[in-house]
Image (cartoon, rainbow, N blue to C red):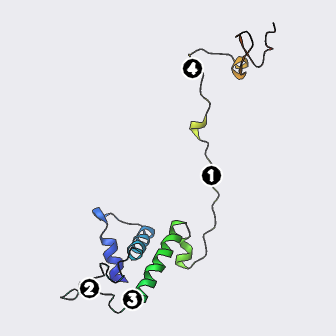
Amino acid sequence: MELLAEKVISSVPGGIQLSPGDALRRVMEAVAGGILLPGGPGLGDPCEKDNPDAAAALNAQQREDLTCSAQYALRLIAYRQIYKVLGMDPLPLQQKVFRRDRSARKRRRSGGEQADSESDSGKMVKTEGGETSTATETPVAK
């Protein structure tokens, strides 16, 4: 297990330091990807001369079970249920602070003209003669 974790974590490109959560996810991704399956890349033992498979003691069924369990754990991690993988109680929910979306503000009128607040709040209404007026005013009748 330690050899597997060391190999996977040390293979991070650029030597970036991983958080514990990212390291766990990477190890699960490696096992879920089939590193232990028969015919897979295997896990070489660096302490031996001929570099034998360190997981040679596992039979084919155990290797498949480990791969399947890692896939399930990875799914739980992806759906923010890592507490189930770790076998602990879920952390209490924090109240989310909603910030007002600044892009949702009303746009200013185009044309650069400054209108007073009364005429700015009314909607433009097209009347029968092609005349336009604001919704706060009464339309011109013919």
Give the residue number, with chain letter if any, for mark 3. Answer: 60
4 or 2: tag closer to the N-terminus: 2
Give the residue number, with chain letter if any, for mark 2. Answer: 45
Instruction: Look at discs 4 and 3 and give the one toward the viewer.
Output: 3
Q: Secondary structure at mark 2?
A: loop
Q: Secondary structure at mark 1?
A: loop
Instruction: Look at discs 2 and 1 and give the one toward the viewer.
Output: 2
Question: Going by the picture, which residue comes out furthest to the top?
Answer: 142
Q: Quadrant of residue 103?
A: top right
**Badge 4 amino acid:** Ser
What's the distance in space between the residues labelled 4 and 1, CA to CA?
Answer: 34 Å
Decide which of 34, 23 is in the foreground and name it.
Answer: 34
How many callouts does the rendering have?
Answer: 4
Q: Secondary structure at mark 3?
A: helix
Give the residue number, with chain letter if any, for mark 1. Answer: 97
4 or 1: tag closer to the N-terminus: 1
Instruction: Look at discs 4 and 1 and give the one toward the viewer.
Output: 4
**Badge 1 amino acid:** Val
What's the distance in space between the residues labelled 4 and 2, CA to CA?
Answer: 71 Å
